[in-house]
Image (cartoon, rainbow, N blue to C red):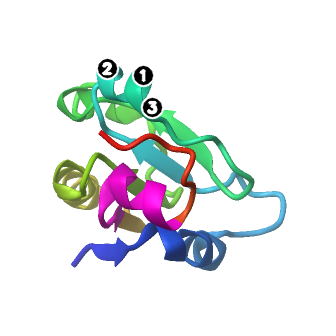
Amino acid sequence: MIAQVRPAQLSDWLAAQAGAPDAEPPVVLDVREPWELQTASVAPEAGFRLVAIPMGEVPARLGELEPERPVACLCHHGARSLRVASFLAANGFAQVANIAGGIDAWSHERDAGVPRY
């Protein structure tokens, strides 16, 4: 079962997943297309590393992600990111979450400066 985390709850999920103070931070994996990233993007914040890989490229670029690092997947509304989160979990990623509501909910709950589209 993939954890469903609302953008408003993401900081708590990230903190719960964080390892030792000197460990690499968890990843927020944005799986939207390049045009979507140009339209609305998440600003990197303390507590996570932002990685953008379009959903269709994730299988070929899986080596760019570390299975031992927690990953929270993000898309427009949460459907594509749930599929990617399920794919990651099936491929050995133990700490995976879907950011429910996607960047649209991010704009409402976390950063009103993120444009909605």
**Which quadrant is home to the N terminus?**
bottom left
Which dot marks residue 38? 1
Q: Secondary structure at mark 2?
A: helix
Disc 3 designates what residue? 64
Q: Could you classify mark 2 by the number of other residues whose Cα lies within 10 Å: few (under 14), some (14-19), or many (20 or more)?
A: few
For image coordinates 70% across by 58% down, the residue present is 47
At horizontal 49% and vertical 67% (from top left) the residue drawn is: 109
Q: Is 22 positioned to the left or the right of 64 in the image?
A: right
**Magenta stretch: dominant secondary structure:** helix
Asked whether 54 falls inside the magenta stretch, the response is no
Discs 1/3, front: 1
Q: Secondary structure at mark 3?
A: helix
Contact between labelled residues 3 and 2, with CB atoms less than 8 Å apart: no
Q: Secondary structure at mark 1?
A: helix
Q: Residue at x 23, y 35 (%)?
A: 55
For badge 2, the amino acid type reads Trp
Q: Is residue 42 above or below residue 2?
A: above
User: Quick check: is 102 in the magenta stretch?
Assistant: yes
Query: In this orientation, which residue lies closer to the viewer: 92 or 3?
Result: 3
Region in magenta: 98-109
In-front residue for pair 59/14 = 14
Identify whether 7 is placed above or below 112: below
2 or 3: tag closer to the N-terminus: 2
Are discs 2 and 1 less than 8 Å apart at CB? yes
Q: How many marks?
A: 3
The CA distance from mark 2 to mark 3 is 21 Å
Residue occupied by mark 2: 35
Q: CA distance from mark 2 to mark 1?
A: 5 Å
Q: Residue at x 74, y 57 (%)?
A: 23
Q: Is residue 3 left or right of residue 79?
A: right
The quarter of the displayed image where residue 64 is located: top left
